[in-house]
Structure formats: structure tokens, C-alpha cells
Image: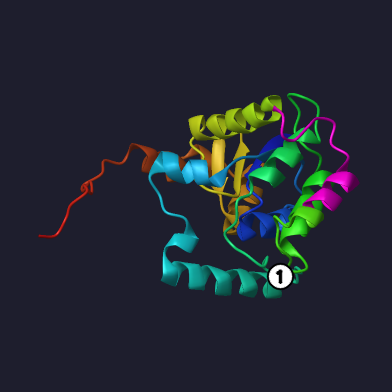
Amino acid sequence: MKHITFWFDVISPYAYLAFERLTGALEGSSYVVSYRPLLFAALLGHWGQKGPAEIEPKRAWTSRHVAWLAHQHRVALQAPAQHPFNPLALLRLLIACAPAGSAPSREVCQQVFLHVWQGGGDANDAPRLAALQRRLSPLRDPNSSEVKQALREATDAAVARGVFGVPTFEVDGRLFWGVDSFPMLAAYLNGDAWFEGPGWQAPATAIAGVVRTESRRT
């Protein structure tokens, strides 16, 4: 049985879609999952990337693509009233619902994902957040220094493994990025020999022919 680490941030609609589709997409495979929240903005900062919402045509495409995927796979999804938003309160709540050193349960993660991606409400609306926290009854104070540090450490751990986006599925040190990686992930879980050959290994050793540098037009 393989162990999957599901790296995610609830700010990502693709992470929500992956969460909802995971069981069906990997049906027939033998695996267990650990759900690991991280701060997506910190990944972007580390790798020098912009988020989809920071590039207007990409923001519009992402919205349409997410709506299409939800329709295609019959996943109920309504964007929150504001997006992007600051997900820190929700990420800390997720971590606070698990004992120190443990990952939050699938049930807890589902409640937080639904809070964001169903109903179209403001994810950071104070009364909604308070009601969610009451329902989840966290084991620790979400605003404690311990929980804040745990989120930072989880994000740092993801970066150290090479995680650059969400959702990412980590299995045996291999990273599968994005909701569209499910067929590839399922093949690996089911023992496809391709993963031991050059198809997987060669891209990691290829030499970059061009490296872009920062420039300014004059």
C-alpha cells in the first residue's frame, strides 16, 4: 500500500476539485492519504512565481477552466465572494484540529473546503469563521504560536521536497502536480514500469538551453 501526501491550500479551486475527485480517480488503487496544508503564497514567493489571479488573462481562464471541470465531473463549486483571499485563518484552523505532529483528517479538510467553495460566501467573514471553528472544535488554539509555526514548517517541508504548486501528490519522493495528474498518479500506484525508465528520469537531467534573466526595456 502506497502513502500519498496531499499538499494543498484551500485558496486553490484545483485543490478543492482534486480533493473531491481523489477517491473516484484512484479507485482500484491501494493507498492511504495524509492531508498537509501549506501556504501557497509562500511557494510562489520561494519559486519567484505569480499566482493565477495576478495575471488578468490567466485569472479569467482559470475561473472558466475551474467552472468547466466542476461541470464535467459534477462537483458542486461556487467561488467565494472574494478571491484571492488570505487563507491563513483557515490553514491554521486545519492544523489546530489535529494533534501536534499529525495531519488533519479528511473530514476536517472537507468541512474547510466546503466553507470556501460552496455557497459563494466570504471565506474570511468573521461570523462564518466563528461558526466553522465551533463545528470543528479544534484541539489547539489556531492563533497560538505553536500552530503558526507548524504551518511555516509544513510549507518549508514542502519547498524542501520540491513542491511548487497545489495540489501536489507526493508518493515515494515523486511529485505529481495538479488535478490533471490523476491518470499518471494512478498508473504509478498500480505499478506501471514506465516510471522506472527514462521517461521519468530524463527530464530531471536535461540541460537548460536558455535561462531567462530580469531585463528592462529602455
Say which quadrant the C terminus sits in.
bottom left
Above or below for 207 versus 26:
above
Left or right, 159 with reference to 22 = left
Rendering coords of residue 115 (x, y %) = 77, 57
Q: Is residue 137 left or right of residue 24?
A: right
Q: Residue at x 73, y 52 (%)?
A: 26
Left or right of 209: which side holds 60? right
> Would you say residue 142 sits in the magenta stretch?
yes
Residue identified by numbered label 1: 78
Q: Give how far across and how far down residue 166 sits, in percent.
A: 57, 49
| Circle 1 SS class | loop
Query: Dot 1, crowdedness within 10 Å: few (<14), some or many (≥20)?
Result: some
Does residue 73 lie above or below 132 as drawn? below
Residue at 50% across / 72% down in the picture? 61
Question: Which of the image's four quarters has the N terminus?
Answer: top right
Residue at the image position 76 percent from the left and 28 percent from the top: 102
Instruction: Tell me what residue is drawn at x 51 percent, y 46 percent.
Output: 41
Range shown magenta: 129-144
Q: Is residue 146 visible?
A: yes
- Extreme residue toward the left, this view: 218
**In-front residue for pair 17/198:** 17
Quarter of the image where one finds residue 216: bottom left
Question: What is the x, y in percent for residue 18?
Answer: 67, 56
Q: Residue furthest front?
A: 126
| Residue 112 highlighted magenta (yes or no) | no
* Position above or below: 94 against 13: above
Dividing the picture into quarters, in which one does residue 198 lie? Answer: top left
- Viewer-closest of 99 and 23: 99
Which amino acid type corresponds to the residue marked 1 in the rendered image?
Answer: Gln
Please tell me which residue lies in front, 139 or 44. 139
Give coordinates of residue 119: x percent, y percent: 78, 68
Q: Can residue 183 be seen?
A: no
